[in-house]
């Protein structure tokens, strides 16, 4: 079977992003956004999703990292959408809930063709790692929009913002893995199209 691979490039006045995504990979990644904490979170998507991901991104940093993080979400969502094609034979739905010490976040997603985000991570600091905590939500919102996916992210428990965010990204990677797997015959919808 042919591997599902998508190369994607996004260049704006604010960001420059190039990536290659292989849905049928082995969790091999090379990620460089220039933001160590964000790179660390993105590696969880590749490793726990079993995707091969090469991603190089630069942002203008004006006034903060918002443009970079949001645009990486857009680029990654576009890459998933492109690699999935007509979504024939995929599971479509994915769910995971990975503990990270005291924290546990559940992620449910549906490659429905209808972008929507429900986001409930009660972070209690202005920063997590080196990034503003609201940009975590912007990343997932951008992904859901460009991947045309419904995405629900809920905190089950947790106090440490780093652990909560890390649990979210690990769970997201595992939910993606389940959703893109082959399992359903044909298009997984009674409509016949997604």
Image (cartoon, helix red, strand yellow):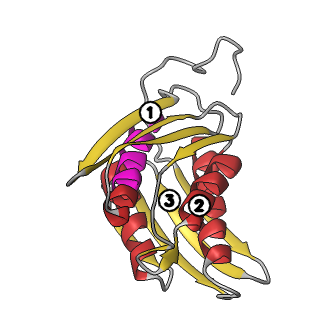
Tell me the element at label 2.
Answer: helix
Where residue 27 sits, quadrant-wise, is bottom left
Using the image, tell me which numbered label, if any, was put on residue 21.
3
What x and y, as percent, mark residue 19?
Answer: 55, 69
What x and y, as percent, mark residue 82?
Answer: 64, 49
Q: Which residues are magenta?
A: 167-180
- Residue 24 visible, this angle: no
Mark 2 surroundings: few (<14), some (14-19) or many (≥20) residues within 10 A: many
Name the residue: 58% across, 65% down: 134
Q: Is residue 25 above or below residue 54?
A: above
Disc with the residue nearer the chain's start (3 vs 1): 3
Name the residue: 31% across, 62% down: 160
- Left or right: 23 in relation to 147: left
Name the residue: 36% across, 49% down: 49
Identify the main secondary structure in magenta.
Answer: helix
- Residue 171 visible, this angle: yes
Mark 1 surroundings: few (<14), some (14-19) or many (≥20) residues within 10 A: many
Q: Extreme front residue here?
A: 124
Distance in Å between CA atoms under marks 1 and 2? 19 Å
What x and y, as percent, mark residue 47?
Answer: 31, 58
Residue 144 lies within the magenta run: no
Distance in Å between CA atoms under marks 2 and 3? 17 Å
Q: Which residue matches tag 2? A: 139
Q: Which residue matches tag 1? A: 94
Q: In which quadrant is the C terminus drawn?
A: top right
Does the residue at mark 3 contact the one at mark 1 (Cβ under 8 Å)?
no
């Amino acid at each position: 079977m042919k591997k599902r691979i998508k190369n994607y490039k996004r260049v704006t006045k604010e960001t420059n992003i190039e990536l290659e995504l292989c849905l049928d990979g082995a969790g091999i990644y090379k990620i460089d956004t220039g933001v160590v904490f964000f790179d660390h979170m993105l590696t969880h998507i590749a490793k726990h999703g079993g995707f091969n991901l090469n991603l190089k991104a630069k942002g203008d940093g004006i006034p903060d990292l918002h443009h970079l993080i949001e645009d990486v979400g857009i680029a990654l969502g576009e890459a998933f959408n492109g690699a999935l094609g007509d979504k024939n034979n995929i599971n479509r739905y994915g769910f995971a809930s990975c503990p990270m010490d005291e924290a546990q976040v559940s992620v449910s997603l549906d490659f429905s063709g209808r972008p929507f985000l429900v986001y409930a991570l009660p972070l209690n600091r202005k920063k997590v790692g080196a990034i503003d905590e609201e940009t975590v939500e912007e990343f997932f919102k951008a992904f859901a929009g460009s991947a045309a996916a419904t995405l629900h992210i809920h905190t089950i428990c947790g106090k440490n913002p780093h652990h909560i965010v890390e649990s979210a990204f690990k769970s997201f990677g595992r939910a993606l893995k389940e959703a893109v797997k082959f399992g359903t015959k044909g298009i997984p919808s009674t409509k016949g199209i997604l």
